[in-house]
Amino acid sequence: MNRKTISKARRAQSLVRYYLLAGLFLRPAACEECGATGQMIEAAHHDYDQPLHVRWLCRSCHVRWDKREPKNGTVVVMSRDFAGTSVDAEQFTGKKAERVTAQDAVEVGT
């Protein structure tokens, strides 16, 4: 299943990135949830309408928190096949498609 970040979430993430690069935010050394150190600590948004209100979490705590309290920052996107018709994500098998030549397509259509 493919997901796409909504623009409100992307703007909030970009603003935090700007604040970090400008030195207006300092990334803490430890996760607020589990106290883990020695790994990247991420800004986790409470609400994308308040982009600077964040918790500082390690990746695993961030994922767990987002599953417990979803912020709806992403949406499921439908895959497209080569003909331009939608392919339902549930139906997609992930198997490599066989190469079909124009001649094969004509023979199948007859």
Image (tube, helix red, strand yellow):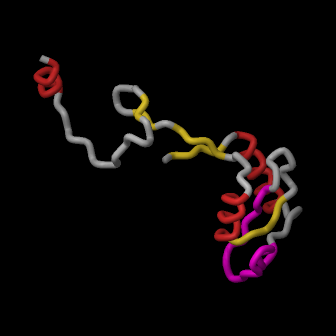
| Residue name at image x 76 percent, y 57 percent | 17
Chain part drawn in magenta: 28-45
When asked about the image quadrant of residue 67, the answer is bottom right
Q: Give the percent coordinates (x, y) of residue 85.
A: 40, 26
Q: Is residue 105 above or below residue 2?
A: above
Q: Front-most of 64 and 37? A: 64
Residue 61: x and y in percent read 69, 70
Q: Is residue 60 magenta?
A: no
Q: Position of residue 12 (x, y in %)?
A: 78, 49
Residue under the point 26% across and 42% down: 97
Up-down: is 109 above or below 93? above
Which residue in the rendered view is the most extreme toward the top?
110
Quick check: 85 left or right of 108? right
Q: Residue at x 13, y 28 (%)?
A: 104
Q: Position of residue 39 (x, y in %)?
A: 67, 77
- Rendered position, 21 above or below 6: below
Q: Main secondary structure of the magenta part?
A: loop
Which quadrant, please, contains the C terminus? top left
Q: Is 103 located above or below residue 90 in the figure?
A: above
In terms of depth relative to the viewer, which is nearer, 67 or 20?
Answer: 67
Whether residue 30 is in magenta: the answer is yes
Q: Residue at x 64, y 45 (%)?
A: 74
- Can you tell which quarter of the image residue 25 is in? bottom right
Q: How many marks?
A: 0
Q: Is residue 106 left or right of residue 6?
A: left
